[in-house]
Image (tube, rainbow, N blue to C red):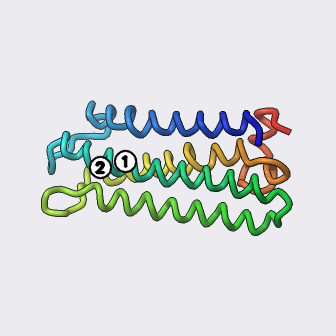
């Protein structure tokens, strides 16, 4: 376990948390993504915050789980770990989809169409890129760091990580 790996995971987590819980609600509040007509904005922000919290906890949790698994299994077969990484990615897509579906509804239970695309896109970016791919690609420990996560060789060369 190296301190730099932990710092990169925590840094990505903090950036993801700030983006999800502060920046994106602010952009919706400023009507950057359009006007929500079917529900009061304050009620929708509460739904958004709940969904963002769920997505954040699962995404960051999967990243921590990935780090612990690869740290404890340095000598294991890398192909099985690639499969684990992709399963995590797939599960996060499902979690994001369910969070958006169940936390983006008006009083009648209908999906709020005005925010569906932007919310789904932002959550996928946050979950898959900021909170899962980026920390796993920059912090996977030991012998696995250049082989498992897609783009790891390029990113690790860019940040000077041998």
In the depicted view, which residue is nearer to us: 108 or 35?
108
In the depicted view, which residue is nearer to us: 158 or 85?
85
Numbered mark located on residue 115 in the image: 2
Numbered mark located on residue 34 in the image: none
Name the residue rendered at 13%, 57% in the picture.
107
Name the residue rendered at 54%, 48% in the picture.
60
How crowded pointer 2 is (Cα within 10 Å; few <14, some 14-19, many 20+) is rated as many
Relative placement, left or right, of 129 versus 115 is: right
Name the residue rendered at 58%, 60% in the picture.
89
Q: Quadrant of the C terminus?
A: top right
Whether residue 86 is situated above or below residue 63 in the rendered picture: below
Relative placement, left or right, of 98 versus 45 is: right
Q: Please give the count of numbered marks on the rendered protein.
A: 2
Whether residue 133 is situated above or below residue 8 in the rendered picture: below
Whether residue 31 is situated above or below residue 69 in the rendered picture: above
Q: Are marks 1 and 2 in contact (CB under 8 Å)?
A: yes
Relative placement, left or right, of 101 versus 124 is: left
């Amino acid at each position: 376990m190296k301190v730099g790996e932990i710092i990169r995971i925590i840094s990505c987590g903090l950036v993801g948390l700030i983006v999800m819980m502060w920046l994106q609600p602010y952009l919706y509040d400023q009507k950057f993504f359009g006007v929500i007509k079917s529900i009061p904005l304050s009620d929708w922000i509460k739904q958004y915050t709940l969904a963002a919290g769920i997505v954040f906890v699962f995404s960051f949790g999967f990243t921590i789980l990935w780090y612990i698994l690869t740290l404890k299994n340095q000598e294991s077969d890398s192909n099985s770990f690639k499969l684990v990484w992709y399963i995590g990615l797939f599960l996060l897509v499902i979690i994001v989809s369910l969070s958006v579906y169940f936390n983006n509804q008006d009083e009648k239970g209908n999906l709020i169409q005005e925010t569906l695309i932007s919310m789904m896109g932002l959550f996928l970016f946050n979950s898959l890129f900021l909170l899962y791919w980026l920390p796993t690609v920059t912090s996977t420990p030991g012998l696995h760091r250049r082989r498992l996560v897609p783009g790891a060789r390029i990113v690790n060369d860019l940040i000077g990580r041998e």
